[in-house]
Amino acid sequence: MRYLLGVDLGTSGTKTVLFDENGTVIASKTIEYPLLQPKNGWAEQDPKFWYDATINSIKAVLEQSKIDSKDVAALSIAGQMHGLVMLDKDGKVLRNSILWCDARTQKQCDEIEEKVGHKRLIEINANPALTGFTAPKILWVRENEKEIYEKCTTILLPKDYVRYMLTGVKAIEISDASGTNLLDIKKREWSDEILEKLSIDKSLLPPIIESSAVAGHITKEIAELTGLKEGTIVAGGAGDNAAAALGTGVCKEGDAFVTLGTSGVIFAHTNKPSIDPLGRVHTFCAAVKNSWTAMSCTLAAGLSLRWMRDELYTIEKDTEAKEGRDVYNLMTANADDIPVGSDGLIYLPYLMGERSPVLDANARGVFFGLSARHTKSHMTRAVLEGITLSQRHNLEVLHEMGIEPNTLTACGGGAQSPFWRQLLADCLKCRIITTTSKEGPALGAAILAGVAAGIFSSVEEACAKLVKVSDKKSDTNCAYAEKYDEIYKLYSFLYPTMRPAFAKLDTLRKKLDGDKVPQYKEVTDVEFERYGKVVSDIPTDKILEQLEKTPLTDGTDYKPSVEVLEQKDLVEVLQNQVFGGLKIQIGYCNGHNKALNALEYHRNAELNVAANDAVLMVAPMTAVHDGIIDTNDVEFFIVRKGQAVLFYETTLHYAPCVAPNEDHFKVCVVLPKDTNTDRPQGVTHDGESGYLTHNNKWLFAHGESNEAKAGITTGKLIGTNYVLE
């Protein structure tokens, strides 16, 4: 009998499983290790954790099984993806690995998108720049730990590092390489274009190998440490989800699985690279030659439940352990006693930021609707439902890509729970099946090892022989599915609503940590999204050229319509591309203003184009109550020279202010025609019209302003009349 070793190198621990050539589990051993979080949103591990756990778990399963090590035909590793391992010229680790769930690199992601181009990056790599991926981690180290970067001669991923330690051969396997942001997905090779634009030396990246290829052989030193025979074949292995796919039999067109481990994944196999143009889900190279995958990743699926276990079920955890029971079973039993929807409690599972499909490193976990009547069991069910609704969010993106599985194979720890399987079936409206093996990633790794050793002629053959469907299945309960349709509507509403608040929370965390933050946010930042957006497809250079011809007075001067700006070609472009064909007027607002003074609202959107840096002051219309708004509701943003900002109709704003390092501002102002006109004769002053000034706009003026003193406003702006430094 020949045997195969599958090593599942995870975030919580490493599990090594010994299989016979029929896929039967002979022995297994799991060794856990900690997740290091030196700062909020950071996640690291010492690669020695993985190496030690791999060595000791291999040794343990060989000792348990008592087989002759010469009968072990091969091994391979399924590994957590994206983690950055940096080695010096002697092959020594230079720093802790920055992991897939680390959220520190948004600045570097922005840099990648700027240098490569968002659209171009997706064309080459099929994925946007994400904080979880490897490339932004490389840039972060280069920018923040220069001395370490300069010593680095090799970059590896977690499982590829451990394989290097087992064999002495440096290589990066194809499915894992897909998640670096540095691979040309279609060509299945490193992208010279991306590397050149990011100034990353290609020599740092080892050769790429296929998942089922022979990557090396066990060295004499490792043989002595583990009990393996020197020269035992080591296959390329795969990223954890690519390996889990094989372990659940997903290896051909139309196959798909859902896994609920530390992260939550929906994974579909395709024979061609199917790419989401918005980059909400990932397209990677599959562990099967000349194939690809479309997959989503919820960063904190099982991690959310583990957090709840560790923080809210500490007593029960100890009690259940003494009785030889798993506290997770108690948690799901408690949740099963709570009605669908957790009595109005909804959980957003963004403990580590989020990757799919909202792409937001600043997102954080939320219990929405928490009341005094909710119990710990309600919170448990809400967590389970929130995790599952996040999978539905991802599945709907796959549907948009033409991927619509009617059946999903469930794997991971959650797949063993009847409660969670039924929850998946009801929320996703798919039949959920399972396989007889509980060792998805480890079995997938063993399958690759078997192909590398020649036991199987192909991955497809190995899957057909080793993967068997179990009798644990769940079909959709239509009554519950209808309820989850309604719950999902609110669930999917919450993130867009809270997105700017998450960005503001990130700024607050940095301030509390003592980090230096900019005095003003940029109009390109997420926090500005609820007020307007930057328009990039208009000829701002021509606008600025004409704007320079407008005068600058001692105070602040506003002209709603001026001939020098209303050039025929500019009017046509702005009228058609920004205002949908509405007739427009083009004027300017120039001056030296440094005080808040007032906020105004036009009945249609307004476009501002800055000739130099300026500070914009804005507030939402929802902040107005009975004609009064507080300056505490006002926010300040920098608009840079050449930027065009389109304010939404629901935004209050007023004259710009002088930006730091500037002594004046010049801003082009574009409005629908006749927005600034005298109030029509005979118009009532009641209701909404009561807030209109003589020039047909709403104006909320501070008592200290000239507008208030002149009596041309009926709205009030209370609070501090901010004067910018």
Image (cartoon, rainbow, N blue to C red):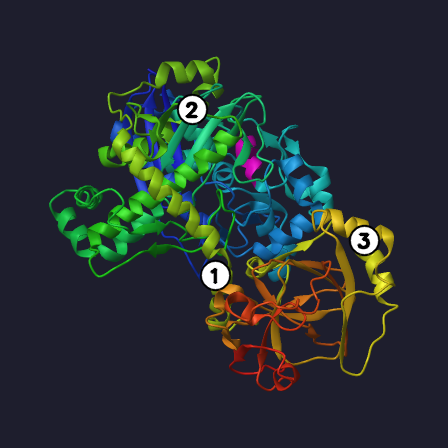
The numbered dot on residue 571 is: 3
Residue 212: image location, x then y, percent: 51, 23
Residue at the (42%, 16%) spot, across then down: 462
Q: Residues within 10 Å of mark 3 (few under 14, many from 20)?
A: some
Say whether disc 2 or disc 1 marks the residue closer to the N-terminus: 2
Q: From the image, tell me which residue sits under label 2.
A: 405
* Dominant secondary structure of the residues highlighted in magenta in the image: helix
Query: Mark 2 is on which residue type?
Result: Pro
Q: Residues within 10 Å of mark 2 (few under 14, many from 20)?
A: some
Residue 176 located within the stretch drawn in magenta: yes
Q: From the image, tell me which residue sits under label 1.
A: 501
| Camera-side residue of 583 and 269 | 583
| Camera-side residue of 601 and 388 | 601
Residue at the (87%, 63%) spot, across then down: 564
Looking at the image, is 490 positioned above or below residue 400? below
Query: Mark 1 is on which residue type?
Result: Ala
Residue at the front extreme of this rendering: 682
Looking at the image, is 385 positioned above or below residue 699? above
The numbered dot on residue 617 is: none
Q: Is residue 45 visible?
A: no
Residue 428 in which image quadrant = top left
Looking at the image, is 419 positioned above or below residue 588? above
Query: Mark 3 is on which residue type?
Result: Val
Q: CA distance from mark 3 to mark 2?
A: 50 Å
Closer to the observer: label 3 or label 2? 3
Say whether disc 3 or disc 2 marks the residue closer to the N-terminus: 2
Residue 230 located within the stretch drawn in magenta: no
The C terminus is located in which quarter? bottom right
Residue 80: image location, x then y, percent: 45, 40
Residue 8: image location, x then y, percent: 39, 35
Magenta span? 172-179
